[in-house]
Image (cartoon, helix red, strand yellow):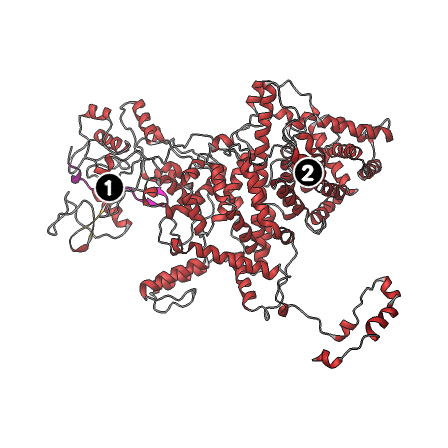
């Protein structure tokens, strides 16, 4: 074989995330000129080795032209047809051996089998490559199928209803039916509920509502169970699940019309303040399902009302639509103890976590809290429309796209097998001739279609101080071995998005660009001035003009600017008009105890996480799932184990949804409300908690089958239950994945993104807690939305992870480049960003905290306001004309008071005036 220096040194160039045509390495020759081709001689200006004319470097087109002139030199490129060697004469079979040698982990030489077959010696390897362990970038990627998951506010209505009940509550369905029928037979002897007309339904519902006002607890509980049976759809008179759901919808709107929900809120308030039940539960060593019976019945009815009224159906009557709007307004208004209903539920959560009420059924409370927040504030689609309206109100341009809709059309990435798997495939096929090589045009098209398949697991960036070239990057040779031919018709979901400005720059990006340009060309800075371009070159002027043309102004930036104006001129700025939208009312109710609410939610999330270990001092979240008598058979134990795991999954789902909804709605309402909540989540260790959650076999968690479909409502009340066996319990359902677990994972990733976005100190927390390997394992889940949020989290910390991490994770870097949106001048992969310097992280958090405290005290803390700035009524006519209600006894004895307090006391007016 010819010496390696006899052929041009060829490298792979990466453009746009895809591997492009090999081009000749650029060498610097005599006189400082750049050469396209092999290394020129050390002395003299003669031709480079190989007989190629030296050419100055003129960009990629010049390199490609040079490559076409030297393409046959050595024939060492797999992407071009083999040609007679000009300097060495290797055959295509020998080139295959050299290529296979480069693919071997460590790059130490060709495979042993190839050595024996060809008798060739291994090319010398660099010293540091000999001891390098094989790279781990592609490990963990499994050939799992794409998950057909559609992200939404909630799961299907039937699934959300079934998750309300634990499997241990199954016998209570018949108890509810019995309580209803005993009362119904007294008034309607020979008729069924489904045979009555609307007036009779309304009369009986009013009769049940009156029964809730009795003082005897047992009677009140039986009436509440009868109402719960009506809300459950009077399933004893139905023959199918669809019929149950239809009657359920009708009955719930009937109950709402007669005022059942307000009566239930009063009863719930009474049960929360029931000190006898709380003290009894505290003294008990083990709390079971029986300790929370009253609360569970009330919460079940309220959850069914909120969840059913919240859902819009095609056959809804006009009066139902008006009732829905009225109910949403009342639910979000401060009508219950002068606070919204959500605040009452938050109070139940904190009381449970403090240990004062361990019998509270936390799963039902959290589910009701989630649906209440969702009903009053709105889901993600409503949030997007409110965001568009607010941008229009502030005079900002409309949003170019809806992120959720764009993500729904993305495909999941499918990473290839590792290098060892590729070599095993080559060995199994034997030493067949390479019949065809991949054409570059086809390769580029394939890369654009599926980004992960363009990268081989052995590609890595070599540290080379001379020319910083890429060496050792390999790609599989045979198309039919590794990459199947592209399909003739692409799938409908793979339609390319319209191309435009990928990520518009912010005002801060323009400031940083101008600051670096001024420092470089002039040597001084002007702070936040983005208009002065004196002394800068003309290309910088054009760059600034382009950046400003595509500048994105967020609602948050406008709100921060307005807040600064209020603080700068409190007198001339006038009084701020705060619109009392549901998010604003909820924030005002949560503000006094918001840190305690966040800590309580994270405590329960920690207890429900699958990675948390059982501790004696941790809170007991299983109070509403454990039966009074523990199971005695193996089958009962298996059923209870499934029920407990399902119970924890539902709690995680509810908490993650509540936190995400609050963060997004507070951010839209006012940025400092969002920052206040986010800062307290960070203080409560939310970031390490979410990382701890993902530090598990996330694929097993998402595909877990902790459900028994025959016990789910309403199937269990309509059909006869088959006999349960251990095999049927182990089999679970036939779904490819668990919807609630995947929903929870995406929500937690979105929360983590919300907390760390544009916050360098919190991004450093991701680095300190070694989140990169944990997040990389989550990429095994082939779901586009989840992968995107994982890649976003990896993108923000890439600049802090160092060159070695980037070298050994080139496939992940490529996926970030192709999947995540980038801004103009986005230097995300390297530590050149001025804001990425670590010395002012603490100052950044302290400044943010000071701004939040100023905002809260200015807008909400009326008691500590400056009295000089408060409005004063100094009009004599309005003061004298003000009506004052005097007590009746004072009016009767007014003459006596006048004589004793006024006439009988001498007053020295001179001293008083002095």
**Residue 903 left/right relative to 144:** right
Query: Which residue lies under the disc numbered 2?
Result: 278
Of 655 and 709, nearer the camera is 655
**Residue 826 left/right relative to 338:** left
Front of the two marks 2 and 1: 2
Which residue sits furthest bottom?
910
**In what element is the residue under mark 1?**
strand
**In what element is the residue under mark 2?**
helix
Q: Position of residue 479 (x, y in %)?
A: 34, 31
Q: Is residue 559 visible?
A: yes
Quarter assignment of residue 520: bottom left
Q: In which quarter of the image is the N terminus?
A: top left
From what the image shows, is residue 843 above or below residue 178? below
From what the image shows, is residue 300 above or below residue 391? above
Q: Quadrant of the C terminus?
A: bottom right
- In the picture, the disc for residue 260 is none
Residue, x 63% and y 66% (percent of image)?
A: 575
Residue extent of the magenta highlight? 3-19
Q: Where is residue 18 in the image (x, y as percent from the top left)?
A: 36, 42
Q: Where is residue 559 in the image (x, y as percent from the top left)?
A: 55, 59
Q: Badge 1: few (under 14), some or many (20 or more) residues near its Cα, within 10 Å?
A: many
- Magenta stretch containing residue 324, yes or no? no
Of 910 and 385, nearer the camera is 910
Query: Which residue lies under the disc numbered 1?
Result: 10
Quarter assignment of residue 602: top right
Residue, x 23% and y 38% (percent of image)?
A: 128
Q: Can residue 552 be seen in this view?
A: no
Distance from disc 2 to disc 1, alpha carbons, whole Å, reads: 77 Å
**Residue 622 left/right relative to 827:** right
From what the image shows, is residue 438 above or below residue 171? below
Q: Which of marks 2 and 1 is nearer the N terminus?
A: 1
């Amino acid at each position: 074989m010819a010496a390696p220096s006899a052929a041009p040194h060829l490298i792979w160039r990466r453009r746009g995330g895809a591997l492009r045509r090999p081009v000749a390495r650029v060498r610097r020759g005599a006189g400082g000129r750049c050469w396209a081709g092999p290394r020129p001689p050390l002395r003299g200006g003669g031709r480079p080795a190989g007989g190629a004319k030296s050419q100055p470097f003129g960009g990629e087109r010049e390199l490609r032209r040079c490559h076409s002139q030297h393409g046959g030199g050595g024939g060492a490129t797999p992407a071009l047809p083999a040609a007679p060697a000009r300097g060495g004469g290797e055959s295509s079979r020998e080139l295959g051996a050299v290529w296979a040698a480069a693919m071997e982990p460590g790059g130490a030489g060709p495979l042993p089998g190839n050595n024996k077959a060809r008798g060739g010696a291994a090319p010398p390897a660099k010293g540091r490559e000999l001891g390098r362990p094989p790279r781990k970038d592609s490990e963990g990627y499994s050939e799992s199928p794409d998950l057909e998951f559609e992200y939404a506010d909630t799961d299907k209505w039937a699934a959300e209803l079934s998750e309300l009940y634990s499997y241990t509550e199954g016998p209570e369905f018949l108890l509810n039916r019995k309580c209803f029928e005993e009362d119904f037979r007294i008034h309607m002897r020979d008729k069924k509920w489904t045979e009555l007309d609307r007036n009779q339904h309304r009369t009986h519902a009013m009769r049940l509502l009156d029964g809730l006002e009795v003082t005897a607890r047992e009677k009140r509980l039986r009436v509440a169970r009868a109402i719960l049976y009506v809300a459950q759809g009077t399933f004893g008179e139905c023959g199918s699940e669809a019929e149950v759901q239809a009657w359920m919808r009708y009955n719930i709107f009937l109950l709402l019309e007669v005022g059942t929900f307000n009566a239930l809120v009063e009863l719930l308030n009474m049960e929360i303040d029931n000190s006898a039940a709380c003290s009894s539960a505290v003294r008990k060593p083990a709390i079971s399902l029986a300790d929370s019976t009253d609360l569970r019945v009330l919460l079940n009815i309220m959850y069914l009302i909120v969840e059913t009224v919240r859902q819009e159906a095609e056959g809804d009557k006009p009066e139902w639509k008006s009732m829905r709007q009225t109910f949403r307004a009342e639910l979000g208004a401060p009508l219950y103890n002068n606070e919204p209903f959500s605040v009452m539920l938050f109070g139940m959560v904190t009381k449970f976590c403090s240990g004062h009420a361990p019998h509270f059924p936390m799963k039902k409370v959290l589910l009701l809290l989630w649906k209440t927040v969702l009903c009053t504030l709105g889901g993600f689609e409503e949030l997007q429309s409110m965001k568009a309206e607010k941008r229009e109100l502030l005079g900002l341009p409309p949003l170019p796209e809806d992120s959720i809709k764009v993500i729904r059309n993305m495909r999941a990435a499918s990473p290839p097998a590792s290098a060892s798997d590729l070599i095993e495939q080559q060995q199994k096929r034997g030493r067949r001739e390479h019949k065809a090589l991949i054409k570059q045009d086809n390769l580029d098209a394939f890369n654009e279609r599926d980004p992960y398949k363009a990268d081989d697991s052995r590609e890595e960036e070599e540290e080379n101080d001379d020319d910083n070239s890429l060496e050792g990057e390999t790609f599989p040779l045979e198309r039919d071995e590794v990459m199947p031919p592209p399909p003739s018709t692409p799938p409908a979901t793979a339609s390319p998005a319209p191309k435009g400005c990928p990520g518009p720059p912010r005002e801060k990006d323009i400031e940083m660009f101008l600051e670096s340009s001024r420092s470089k060309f002039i040597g001084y800075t002007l702070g936040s001035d983005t208009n002065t371009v004196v002394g800068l070159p003309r290309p910088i002027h054009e760059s600034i003009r382009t950046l400003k043309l595509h500048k994105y102004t967020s609602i948050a930036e406008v709100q921060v600017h307005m807040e600064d104006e209020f603080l700068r001129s409190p007198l001339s700025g006038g009084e701020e008009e705060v619109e009392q939208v549901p998010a604003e009312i909820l924030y005002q109710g949560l503000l006094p105890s918001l840190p305690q609410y966040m800590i309580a939610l994270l405590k329960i999330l920690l207890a429900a996480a699958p990675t948390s270990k059982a501790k004696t001092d941790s809170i007991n979240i299983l109070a509403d799932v454990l039966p009074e008598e523990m199971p005695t058979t193996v089958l009962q134990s298996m059923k209870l184990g499934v029920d407990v795991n399902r119970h924890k999954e539902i709690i995680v789902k509810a908490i993650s949804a509540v936190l995400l909804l609050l963060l997004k709605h507070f951010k839209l309402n006012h940025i400092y409300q969002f920052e206040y909540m986010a800062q307290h989540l960070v203080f409560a260790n939310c970031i390490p908690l979410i990382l701890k959650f993902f530090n598990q076999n996330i694929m097993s968690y998402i595909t877990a089958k902790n459900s028994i479909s025959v016990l789910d409502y309403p199937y269990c009340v309509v059909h006869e239950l088959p006999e349960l066996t251990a095999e049927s319990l182990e089999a679970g359902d036939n779904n490819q994945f668990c919807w609630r677990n995947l929903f929870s994972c995406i929500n937690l990733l979105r929360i983590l993104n919300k907390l760390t976005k544009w916050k360098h100190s919190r991004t450093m927390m991701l680095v300190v807690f070694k989140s990169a390997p944990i997040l990389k394992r989550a990429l095994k889940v082939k779901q586009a939305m989840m992968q995107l949020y994982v890649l976003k989290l990896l993108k923000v910390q890439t600049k802090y992870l160092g060159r070695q991490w980037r070298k050994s994770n080139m496939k992940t870097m490529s996926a970030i480049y192709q999947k995540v949106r980038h801004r103009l001048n986005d230097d995300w992969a390297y530590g050149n960003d001025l804001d990425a310097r670590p010395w002012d992280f603490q100052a950044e958090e302290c400044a943010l905290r000071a701004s939040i405290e100023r905002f809260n005290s200015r807008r909400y803390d009326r008691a500590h306001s400056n009295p000089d700035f408060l409005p004063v009524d100094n009009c004599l006519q309005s003061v004298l004309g003000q009506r004052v209600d005097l007590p009746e006894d004072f009016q009767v004895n007014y003459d006596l008071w006048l004589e004793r307090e006024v006439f009988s006391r001498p007053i020295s007016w001179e001293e008083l005036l002095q």
